[in-house]
C-alpha cells in the first residue's frame, strides 16, 4: 500500500468491503450529547431504557469506547436494494424495511470490521475497536463529522448521491489520522420526510424523531402493547419503516445496495402475514436466524402481523387470527382481537363477532378482555344503524 497513513487506512477499509470511509477526530461531541439528553428528558426514547444518561455520556465520548482513541474511522455501506417482485391477488402480505431483508447487517459489518481491526493492529501496531449500531457510540453525528454526509431533517445521515440509504459502522483507533472536513450541506427548505411520516414522528422543523411514534421503534424495539391510536397508521409494516427514506429526494434514483443486504427471496421483503401467526419460538428462529428480524422476537413479529392484518387483511385471514386468540402471549391475543374487529368492520362482521365472543368466555387477562370487548362493541355499533335502517324499510 502506497501513500500517507490516512490514505492507507482508508484503502484498507475499502479492501475490507466498505466503499465509503471518512475520518473524524476522536473527541467528545457536546452538541450530540445535548441533543440526546434533551430527547431523553422529553421521554422520546420510549421504552429503550438502555439509552439512559450514562449511555449517552459514553456514546458521545470516544475515549470511553476505546482508551487512548485518537481517531474514529467511520464506514458506510449502501443499502438501497431494489424491491423484489411482489405477488398480487394472494393472501395479505406485510412489508419489511429494506435494510432488514437480507443478511443481518450487524453480521455483514462485523466480519468486515474485524478485518479492519486486525490489520490496524498487525500492520500499524495500533489499538482499535469497532462497533456497528449497538456500540455505545452515536454513529450519525460522528459520520457527519467525518464528512460522509449531513444530518437531514429526518435525522438520517444523508450521503451525497446515496441519501439516507447508507448503514454506518465505526472503528476507533489510537492511530492519529488526518480528519476529513464536515460537509457544508443542508436540506434547505425541503420537508418531504416530515410530511411523509405516517405517524407524525418527526418534529415540525425536523432534526428530532419521537421514537414513541416511530413505526420502526414500535415494530422492532418496543415490547408489549402498540397504542391503539397508532395501529392504523402502521399499514402493512411488520419490521421497520422506510417512509421518511423513500420520501427523500437525495439518492432517490440511485439503486445501490450491498449484495449481502439483498433479500434471498421475495418473501423476506413481503411475508405472508397469516403465516407469521402460528410460528413457535423454534420455527421463528429457524426462519429468521441470521437476519435482523430476530430482534423483534417471535412475540413481536406475531403482534406486528396482527396489526398489519387489521389494516390490510381480509376474511381469509380470520381463521389464523382466531387461532391467535389462544396464543400463549397476551400481547398477541390482544392485537389479534383488534385485527379481527378491524376486518369484521370491513367484511364478514358475523364471523368476526363469533370469533371474538367465543374467546371472551375463556380469556382471563384484563387487557385482552378489554380489547375483545372494544372490538365487539365497535362491530355491533357499526352494524346497528344499518340494521335499524333495514328493519325500518322492511317493516
Ligand atoms: C436508537 C436508534 C433508533 C431509534 C431512535 C432513532 C432516532 N431518530 O432517534 C429508532 C428505533 C426509532 C430507530 C429507527 C431507525 N433507524 Co436507527 N438507530 C438507533 C441507534 C442505535 C442510536 C441512535 C440514537 O441514539 N438516536 C438518538 C438521537 C438523539 O441521536 P442521533 O439521531 O444519532 O443523533 C442526533 C444528534 O447527534 C443531533 N445532531 C448532531 N449533529 C446535528 C446536526 C444537525 C443539523 C441536526 C439537526 C442535529 C444534529 O441530532 C442528531 C439527529 O437526531 C443508531 C446506531 C448508533 N449507535 O448510533 C441507529 C441508526 C441511527 N439507525 C439507523 C436506521 C437505518 C434506522 C431506520 C431507517 C430503520 C428502519 N428502516 O426502520 C429508522 C429510521 C428512523 C429515523 N428517521 O431516524 C441507522 C441510520 C443510518 C443513517 N444513514 O443515518 C443507524 C446509524 C444504525 C446503523 N449502524 O446504520 N433507530
Ligand atoms: S421510520 Fe417511518 S415512522 Fe419513523 S420517522 Fe421515519 S417515516 Fe416516521
Ligand atoms: S426528505 Fe428533504 S428534509 Fe427530509 S432528510 Fe431528505 S432532503 Fe432533508
Image (tube, helix red, strand yellow):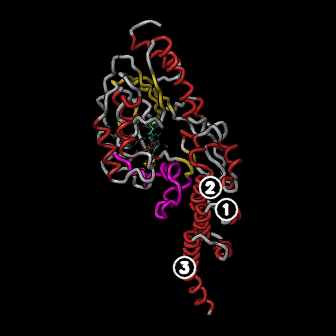
Please state which of the two labelled residues, at mark 1 or mark 3, is closer to the viewer: 1
Is residue 242 or residue 327 the one in the foreground? 327
> Magenta stretch?
208-236
Q: Secondary structure at mark 2?
A: helix
Q: In the figure, is residue 271 to the left or right of 117?
A: right
The location of residue 373, given as percent across then percent down, is 57, 75
Choose the circle earlier in sequence order: 3 or 2: 2
Asked if disc 2 and disc 1 are in contact, CB closer than 8 Å, the reply is yes
Q: Is residue 231 magenta?
A: yes
Residue under numbered circle 1: 327
- SS state under label 1: loop
Closer to the chain start, of discs 2 and 1, is 2
Position of residue 216 in the picture relative to residue 376 (left or right) = left
Q: Is residue 253 visible?
A: no
Q: Which residue is mark 2?
A: 302
Q: CA distance from mark 2 to mark 1?
A: 10 Å
Amino acid at each position: 500500500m502506497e501513500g500517507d497513513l490516512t490514505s492507507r487506512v482508508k484503502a484498507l477499509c475499502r479492501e475490507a468491503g466498505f466503499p465509503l470511509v471518512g475520518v473524524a477526530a476522536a473527541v467528545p461531541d457536546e452538541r450530540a450529547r445535548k441533543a440526546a439528553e434533551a430527547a431523553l428528558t422529553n421521554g422520546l426514547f420510549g421504552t429503550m431504557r438502555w439509552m439512559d444518561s450514562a449511555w449517552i455520556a459514553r456514546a458521545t465520548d470516544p475515549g470511553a469506547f476505546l482508551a487512548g482513541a485518537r481517531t474514529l474511522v467511520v464506514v458506510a455501506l449502501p443499502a438501497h436494494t431494489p424491491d423484489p417482485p411482489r405477488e398480487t391477488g394472494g393472501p395479505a402480505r406485510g412489508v419489511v424495511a429494506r435494510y432488514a431483508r437480507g443478511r443481518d447487517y450487524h453480521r455483514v459489518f462485523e466480519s468486515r470490521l474485524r478485518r479492519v481491526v486486525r490489520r490496524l493492529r498487525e500492520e500499524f501496531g495500533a489499538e482499535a475497536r469497532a462497533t456497528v449500531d449497538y456500540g455505545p457510540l452515536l454513529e450519525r453525528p460522528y459520520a457527519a463529522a467525518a464528512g460522509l454526509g449531513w444530518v437531514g431533517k429526518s435525522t438520517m445521515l444523508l450521503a451525497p448521491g446515496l441519501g439516507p440509504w447508507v448503514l454506518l459502522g465505526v472503528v476507533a483507533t489510537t492511530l492519529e489520522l488526518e480528519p476529513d472536513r464536515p460537509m457544508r450541506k443542508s436540506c434547505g427548505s425541503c420537508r418531504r420526510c416530515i410530511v411523509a411520516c405516517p405517524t407524525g414522528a418527526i418534529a415540525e422543523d425536523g432534526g428530532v424523531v419521537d421514537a414513541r411514534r416511530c413505526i420502526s421503534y414500535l415494530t422492532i424495539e418496543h415490547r408489549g402493547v402498540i397504542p391503539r391510536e397508532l395501529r392504523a397508521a402502521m399499514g402493512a409494516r411488520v419490521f421497520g419503516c422506510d417512509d421518511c427514506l423513500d420520501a427523500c429526494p437525495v439518492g432517490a434514483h440511485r439503486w445501490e445496495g450491498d449484495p449481502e443486504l439483498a433479500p434471498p427471496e421475495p418473501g423476506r421483503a413481503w411475508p405472508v402475514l397469516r403465516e407469521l401467526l402460528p410460528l413457535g419460538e423454534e420455527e421463528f428462529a429457524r426462519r429468521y436466524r441470521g437476519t435482523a428480524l430476530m430482534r423483534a422476537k417471535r412475540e413481536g413479529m406475531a403482534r406486528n402481523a396482527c396489526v398489519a392484518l387489521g389494516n390490510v387483511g381480509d376474511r381469509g385471514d380470520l381463521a389464523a387470527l382466531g387461532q391467535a386468540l389462544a396464543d400463549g402471549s397476551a400481547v398477541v391475543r390482544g392485537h389479534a382481537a383488534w385485527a379481527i374487529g378491524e376486518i369484521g368492520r370491513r367484511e364478514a362482521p358475523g364471523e368476526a363477532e363469533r370469533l371474538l365472543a367465543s374467546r371472551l368466555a375463556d380469556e382471563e387477562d384484563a387487557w385482552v378482555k378489554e380489547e375483545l370487548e372494544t372490538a365487539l362493541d365497535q362491530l355491533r355499533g357499526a352494524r346497528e344503524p344499518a340494521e335499524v335502517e333495514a328493519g325500518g324499510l322492511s317493516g
